Image (cartoon, grey):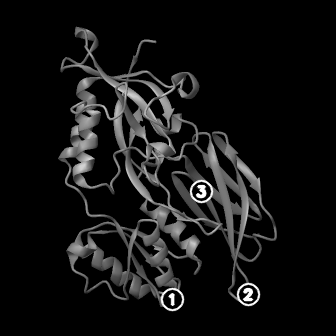
């Protein structure tokens, strides 16, 4: 099969971490996704929980080596000229499975190319768990081959090397219930998000404020305290996402913060809408994927109740999902989750 020309780009993406309903933790990962013909390549590989090698939490030297590898400035890491395109978000080991492809150069042939050297071809995509790929058994036969114009391809990847590395994003936690904040900080750190607790951001140096990506307020934080925090960040010249904590429920707050930290463009997200009204959820997805719905409810004694409501594959489009009335009565909240995103909504009644 000959490779047709495709556009190539990169965009921020996220593998959503979180505290799951069964008590397990899922690691938060941020990475650059490959945008092929204007759409994330990851979305074309069914509902795959994976990240690209261009992850923000790898050491700078390894990140640079990954970029150089995709530019074919180093030997292929796998037999047959194959490169890892997406790997396991937890350990990145090949034994867990990875999407690989052959990457090679192709002569432009004059007018067909961009006039600036060879094109790059990605072909023979496969799911691989050891040193050799079995294209017959595990090939992605409907994906590719893609031929990228050399100049566009090189410019996108070189731009990553030219960008100054940002400090790792952290979350600033502000609230009255220190015990809740401590548990929340511990949960965030467990999934790979830095978190600190403070009562006053005015004394925090501007260079430290610039390392935060979000600020989470507890429900008891007064409006004048919130205003003072916002002013401190404005003086430091940094924009952050502000999260108003819905309830002192750790998995719920983690989900809110995960959503706030999502830097991926809206048009390139799978999960784009969640509505929760009168025991029914409205969900919208941009590609076929697995969606999980969990309800968190506070009873009159402020005890937390967790209910797994839905776990299934949804086709592209809008869906209305009836929910268990017992799970959503009173003060309750719905968390919708895919592999790459999470949304949270309080259940509205009447």
Q: Residue at x 34, y 87 (%)?
A: 200
Pointer 2 with pointer 1, Cβ within 8 A: no
Disc 2 to disc 1, C-alpha distance = 20 Å
Q: Nearer the viewer, residue 70 or 312?
A: 70
Task: Decide if residue 46 is on the left or right side of residue 2.
Answer: right
Q: Is residue 177 visible?
A: no
SS category of the residue bearing label 1 = helix
Q: Residue at x 51, y 88 (%)?
A: 179
Task: Residue under label 1, please give it.
Answer: 179
Task: Residue under label 2, please give it.
Answer: 300
- Badge nearest the viewer, 3 or 2: 3
Task: Residue under label 3, please give it.
Answer: 337
Q: Is residue 180 visible?
A: yes
Disc 1 to disc 3, C-alpha distance = 27 Å
Q: Is residue 237 above or below residue 75?
A: below
Position in image of residue 17 (x %, y %): 50, 61
Q: Which image quadrant for residue 228?
A: bottom left
Which one is earlier in the sequence, the residue at label 3 or at label 2? 2
Which one is earlier in the sequence, the residue at label 1 or at label 3? 1
Pointer 3 with pointer 2, Cβ within 8 A: no
- Looking at the rendered image, the quarter that the C terminus falls into is bottom right
Q: Is residue 200 above or below residue 31?
A: below
Position in image of residue 68 (x %, y %): 23, 38
Q: Nearer the viewer, residue 344 or 223?
A: 344
The circle drawn on residue 271 is: none
SS category of the residue bearing label 3 = strand
Q: Residues within 10 Å of mark 1 (few under 14, many from 20)?
A: few
Furthest residue toward front = 131
- Badge nearest the viewer, 2 or 1: 1
């Amino acid at each position: 099969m000959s490779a047709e020309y495709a556009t190539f780009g990169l965009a921020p993406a996220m593998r959503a971490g979180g505290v799951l309903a069964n008590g397990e933790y899922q690691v938060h990962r941020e990475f650059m996704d490959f945008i092929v013909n204007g759409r994330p390549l990851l979305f074309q590989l069914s509902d795959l929980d994976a990240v690209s090698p261009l992850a923000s939490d790898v050491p700078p030297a390894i990140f640079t080596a990954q970029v150089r590898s995709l530019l074919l400035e180093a030997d292929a890491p796998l037999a047959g000229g194959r490169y890892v395109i997406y790997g396991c978000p937890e350990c990145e080991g090949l034994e867990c499975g990875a999407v690989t492809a052959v990457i090679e150069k192709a002569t432009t042939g004059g007018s067909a190319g961009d006039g600036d050297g060879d094109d790059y071809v990605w072909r023979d995509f496969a799911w691989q768990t050891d040193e050799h790929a079995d294209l017959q058994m595990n090939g992605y036969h409907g994906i590719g081959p893609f031929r990228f114009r050399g100049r566009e391809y090189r410019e996108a990847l070189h731009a990553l090397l030219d960008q100054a590395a940002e400090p790792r994003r952290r979350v600033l936690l502000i609230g009255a219930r220190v015990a809740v904040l401590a548990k929340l900080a511990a949960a965030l750190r467990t999934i790979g998000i830095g978190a600190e607790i403070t009562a006053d951001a005015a004394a925090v140096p501007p260079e430290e404020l610039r390392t935060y990506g979000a600020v989470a307020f507890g429900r008891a934080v007064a409006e004048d305290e919130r205003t003072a925090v916002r002013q401190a960040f404005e003086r430091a010249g940094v924009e952050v996402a502000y999260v108003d904590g819905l309830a002192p429920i750790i998995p719920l707050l983690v989900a809110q913060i995960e959503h706030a930290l999502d830097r991926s463009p809206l048009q390139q997200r799978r999960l784009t809408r969640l509505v929760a009204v009168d025991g029914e959820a409205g969900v919208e997805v941009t590609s076929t994927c697995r969606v999980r719905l969990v309800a968190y409810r506070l009873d009159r004694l402020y005890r937390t109740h967790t209910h797994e409501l839905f776990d299934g594959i949804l086709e592209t489009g809008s869906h209305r999902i009836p929910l268990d009335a017992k799970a959503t009565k009173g003060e309750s909240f719905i968390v919708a989750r895919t592999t790459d995103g999470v949304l949270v909504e309080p259940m509205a009644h009447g």
